[in-house]
Amino acid sequence: MELITNVQAGWRYLMDEVSDPRTRDWPMMSSPFPTMALSLCYAYIVKVLGPKLMENRKPFELRKVLIVYNFLQVLFSTWLFYEACVSGWTAGYSLRCQPVDYSNSPLALRMARGCWWYYFSKFTEFFDTFFFVMRKRYDQVSTLHVIHHGIMPMSVWWGVKFTPGGHSSFFGLLNTFVHIIMYAYYMLAAMGPKVQKYLWWKKYLTVLQMVQFILVMTHAFQLLIWNECNYPIAFAYFIGAHAVMFYFLFSNFYKQAYAVRKQAKKEKDEKMALANGNVEGVPNKNISNNNNNLNGKPDFYQTIDKTVEDSYSTTRHRAFVGFGSN
């Protein structure tokens, strides 16, 4: 009983005395358990309940919904990025070491509110996965995808509770900027093959994500060498570790999605070249078979002939939708 009492007392001290008093009474900020419950419900819905409900149903046609959703996410991300800039990162914040301003000054409160809305945005990103389930794209609801979306609200919650602003808000600044580009890309991809053929830069979206995490880990871990502003070092470890983990996840995806695919295409082209170099007068069976399978069209048209829903799903997956809502 004494142990339980001490744990409860320590927990209340952490939640009530150590945390930022300004955010204590804000929605979802009194305790991490509501956020944890929503994250667990999200995982249950997308991995168990959703597929079960869709088992005997046809996939939903969501082209217009996807366009509107991604457009709203672009607007939301743009506003969050703007708030991070005007309340701190273009208003005197230091890239070297930036303490949290716990005062009630207009800029400090504006930054804190911006951090809360960034936390809220992690729940809106749940709809990425909900739409996959409604369209029965279960291959894209990977375990890593669900873990990423599921843990982000919890990760950001601690920042809003204890350090809403300061050094670690650099991650939110970069992440919202990347989301502007990412959701704009997804919105265009949802418009179908006629627009997708102009989205040649999809692979660079993954590169941008990896650059983001390199910058975040460099920015966070520099405090391990020189922490002149006495920023809570635990949060430097916390943010830096997240950046390292996500960098390797994105890097692995990039290798699988582009490097491996490029090698496979090269090997296929070499086999075709050998097949095309047969004796004159002997019909090339490879060309004949390909033409029959594709109605006389080259491989390029395989994507173009797909429905808008299929094309959007494929394009988004290649841009690393599995881990794209930071």
Image (cartoon, rainbow, N blue to C red):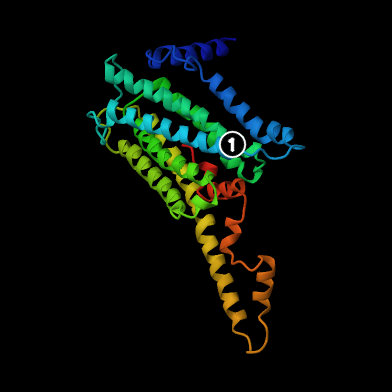
Q: Position of residue 239 (x, y in %)?
A: 41, 35
Classify mark 1: helix, strand or loop.
helix
Image point (60%, 36%), residue name: 131
Image point (37%, 29%), residue name: 79
Task: Depth check: give the residue in front, 153 or 45.
Answer: 45
Q: Is residue 189 above or below residue 175?
A: below
Relative placement, left or right, of 270 versus 56 is left
* Disc 1 packing (10 Å; few <14; some 14–19; many ≥20): many
Relative placement, left or right, of 318 versus 160 is right
Image quadrant in which the N terminus is located = top right
Extreme-bottom residue of the structure: 280
Extreme-right residue of the structure: 56
- What kind of residue is marked 1? Thr
Q: Is residue 190 above or below residue 231?
A: below
Task: Depth check: give the residue in front, 74 or 65.
Answer: 65
Q: Position of residue 188 (x, y in %)?
A: 48, 45
Q: Position of residue 241 (x, y in %)?
A: 44, 38
Can residue 123 be seen here? The reply is: yes
Q: Quadrant of residue 110?
A: top left
Q: Quadrant of residue 225?
A: top left
Image point (56%, 62%), residue name: 300
Q: Position of residue 276 (x, y in %)?
A: 60, 81
Residue that badge 1 annotates: 129
Can residue 147 be seen here? The reply is: no
Q: Is residue 152 above or below residue 20?
A: below
Extreme-left residue of the structure: 92
Relative placement, left or right, of 203 versus 136 is left
